[in-house]
Structures are given as C-alpha cells and as structure tokens.
Amino acid sequence: MINYVYQLVSPGIISIKYEDIFLGEEVIVKPTYMAICHADQRYYMGKRDFNKLRGKLPMALIHECVGKVAYDKTGTYFTGEKVVLIPNIPPKNPSKIIYENYAKGSGFRSSGYDGFMREFVNLPTDRVVPYKCAKDSYMAITEFVSVGVHAIDRFKKTAHDIKNSVGIWGDGSLAYVLACMIKKAFPGVNLTIVGKDAYKLSQFMFSDSTFLAEDLPEDFNIDHAFECAGGEGSYYAIDDIIKHINPQGSVMLLGVSENKVALNTRDILEKGLTFVGCSRSGREDFENAVRCMEDEVFMKRISRIIFEDGPVGSTDDIHRVFQNDLNIPFKTVFKWNL
C-alpha cells in the first residue's frame, strides 16, 4: 500500500515522500483533524538549534491528531471507529516504575520521527485510544490535554495535603488547559493565574484571580505552583514562584526553554521546595484525557481556546495554517483532507 508523507525538509519547505505500508498487525488510521503545537511551529519556522534541526529533518510534523480506523487485522478496532493517536514510541521493555514518556529508548513522533501529516498512519494497536465525542475538531487537541492530565496526576502524588491555593505562571494554551484541569480535580482550590498578556488573562474567567506579572502584590502567596511560561519567561516565572510560594510547596515545571535557566537555590533549600519536571504523557493519560473531553463543562471551557482554520487539501494549505497560527493566541486545529 503506497502512502503519502508530507515532510518538512527545511524550515518552511514541505516535500512529499512515498512509502510502503504493509497490512500487518498494526492498525491503519486515516487522519481527520490535527492541531498545531508550539514545537511544530518552532520546527516549521526553523527556531531550533541548527544542529538539532539538521539532525531531525526531513520529518513529518504534527503530534496532535484524531482519525478513523481504515484497517485493523487484529480486530481490536472496527473500521470507521474514531480514535486519538498517541505519538509516544515506548521502549520494547517498558518499566513498571518509569513512565513511558520519560523512559530511556523511547521516541516521539514529530520530534525525530515522522509525525501524523500523512495520508494514512500505521501504529501498534496500543497507540490509539477510541472516543465517541461528536466534535472531532475539538478532540484534535486531546494529546495536549493529556499533558495536563499527566501533570495533575504527578501533582497529586507529589504535593502535600495543604492545597488551599494554587498559582499558574503563564497565560497560554497549556496554562489554560491546566487551569481547567485544576478546577475539575480540586473544585475548592483558590486558583490564581499570573501572566503577561491582558487579553489572554481575560479568558481565564473561571479562575479566582488573575494578575499581570508586574502587578503581583508583594504579600501574595500560594501553596503550590505550575510553571507554564517557557522560553525566556521561564527564569522570571520560576523566580516569582520561589518568592511567593509557601514552605514545602511543590512546583510543577512544564515550560520548555531552549536555554539554561538560573535557579535561586538558597530560597529553594530554605523553603524545602519540591520541583517536578513534567513533559508529554502516556496511554493512561490519553484515556483520562478522552474522559475529560467528554465532560460537557470541561469541553465548553476548552472550546474557548480553539480556532478552527480551513481544511487542508494541498501543501499550500499546510503553509497557510502554519502562517495563520502565528496570529492565533491559543490553539489552531484544521481538517486534514490529504
């Protein structure tokens, strides 16, 4: 079976690769909707270290995707069944202790391996999760939601029982998803969002308070914190968190920075803080994310950050959605017609 793979060969340049798919024990999925992640955008724009970029390209982008089963010899899924695709490539001998998304020898699609910008995608049967939600375009961001699910799970296992107040530093898509997750998992918590963009902060209407970072009161404090700033903002966010968090608080780090970030270790030690790095997610997180997305209140909140661009039916359309995404404050999704 001949398959079309739409690869980024250099920043801003898409080429079509032809490959054979063998109808073996893997499930064959026809992608229907996709979403753009900041990581995809950095590859597309060439905003990665030159040597890292050269080592990963050519590569098909996109790791947030839903589709319909086209063929499954194993009978695990029926033809036409709607599924979320899992981009993780776990090691052959998974650990019972180490999460699959951190395990040595694991891989990730659209980061060194072809992502989901293909005519058909062949995956092991455990790399898809079925769903029934009618809004396929919203379900395209399930992978993104699963990252928040994973962070909340690790927070529950790490943070002490005093959870009266939680702060999120960052006002982007990940901060928004985490805010929704926190309000769902801990309805009684006092939730504060600290950001840099007044418009984005205005979308966090369900939080208890919002602050521009420069207006944060000196006497402000929280029990635990999530850092979602990333980039150059990571240093300032983490420094603020260390200053305003209560003793023995847990700090969940989710913001990706290309450069090293200095830490105020004196105050970290003095307060006895716990820092936890959170990245990506595993199958269990995807299953829980699907359940979250099927919750009406959660889905209604999530819909506020989704912009659906026009369908993609050509390579020109691929360029269009990536260019348009640069002007979208949160998440861009699109129908895949290639």
Image (cartoon, rainbow, N blue to C red):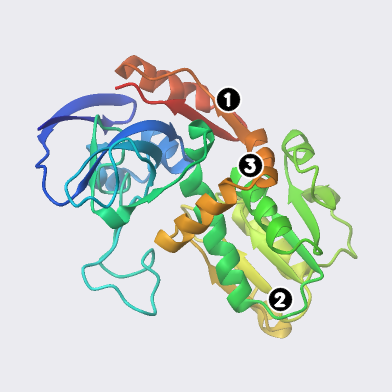
Please determine whether, in this image, residue 198 is positioned above or below residue 151: above
Q: Quadrant of residue 187?
A: bottom right
In terms of sequence position, does the residue under pointer 2 or pointer 3 come before the other?
2
Q: x, y percentage for residue 179?
A: 69, 52
Mark 3 is surrounded, within 10 Å at the Cα level, by few (under 14), some (14 to 19) or many (20 or more) other residues, namely: some
Check disc 3 and give the amino acid type. Met
Q: Amino acid at mark 1?
A: Asn
Question: Gap in Å between the C-alphas at discs 2 and 3?
Answer: 30 Å
CB atoms of marks 1 and 3 within 8 Å: no
Vertical placement of 11 versus 248: above or below? above
Residue found 40% across the figure and 70% down from its top: 99
Q: Secondary structure at mark 1?
A: loop
Task: Out of 281 and 235, give the one closest to the viewer.
Answer: 281
Any mark on residue 249, and which?
2
Q: What residue is shown with label 1?
A: 327
In the image, 78 versus 301, the foreground residue is: 78
Secondary structure beneath dot 2 equals loop
Cα separation, mark 2 vs mark 1, equals 36 Å
**Percent x, y of residue 35:** 46, 35
